[in-house]
Amino acid sequence: MFGGRLGIFELLVIFLILWSMIFWLKMLVECATKEPNQGNDKIIWILIIVLVGWLGALIYYFVRRPQRIAQYGS
């Protein structure tokens, strides 16, 4: 770390940060493009994902996404 070389821990942290950013962006795009326009559900889920960050993306992935797929298909 101090010699200009990254250790395993630093690489793991960088990987997790990049993964969470990509996952957050993927869930935001999926919600914006595939969520139906009925009611305010789409706006509410987008706000949850944007304001809560990667945790909101996880909530969307495990709570809403399976419901949407079962109800509407893709």
Image: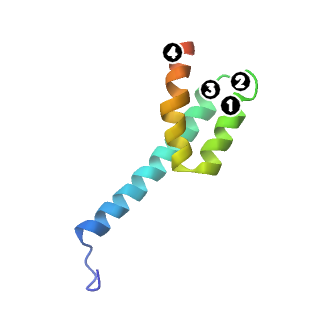
Q: In front of the other: label 4 or label 3?
A: 4
Q: Residues within 10 Å of mark 1 (few under 14, many from 20)?
A: some
The numbered dot on residue 37 is 2
Label 3, label 2: how far apart the Cα atoms are: 7 Å
Q: Which residue is mark 4?
A: 70
Q: CA distance from mark 1 to mark 4?
A: 17 Å
- Residue type at mark 1 is Lys
Marked residue nearer the N-terminal end (2 or 4): 2
In this view of the protein, can residue 74 be seen by the observer? no
Residue placed under numbered mark 3 in the picture: 35
Label 1 or label 3, whichever comes before in sequence order: 3
| Disc 1: which residue | 42
Q: Is residue 34 above or below residue 2?
A: above
Indicate which disc residue 13 carries: none
Helix, strand or loop for disc 4 = helix
Q: Disc 2 versus disc 1: distance between alpha carbons?
A: 6 Å
Compared with 20, 44 (above or below) is above
Residue at (56, 50) in percent of width and height: 53
Q: Are marks 1 and 3 in contact (CB under 8 Å)?
A: yes
Q: Answer few, some or many: residues within 10 Å of disc 3's Cα (few below 14, many 20 plus, some between 14 and 19).
A: many
Q: Are marks 3 and 2 in contact (CB under 8 Å)?
A: yes
Pointer 4 local density, CA inside 10 Å: few below 14, some 14–19, many at least 20: few
Q: Nearer the viewer, residue 33 or 60?
A: 60
Which label's residue is closer to the chain start, 1 or 4? 1
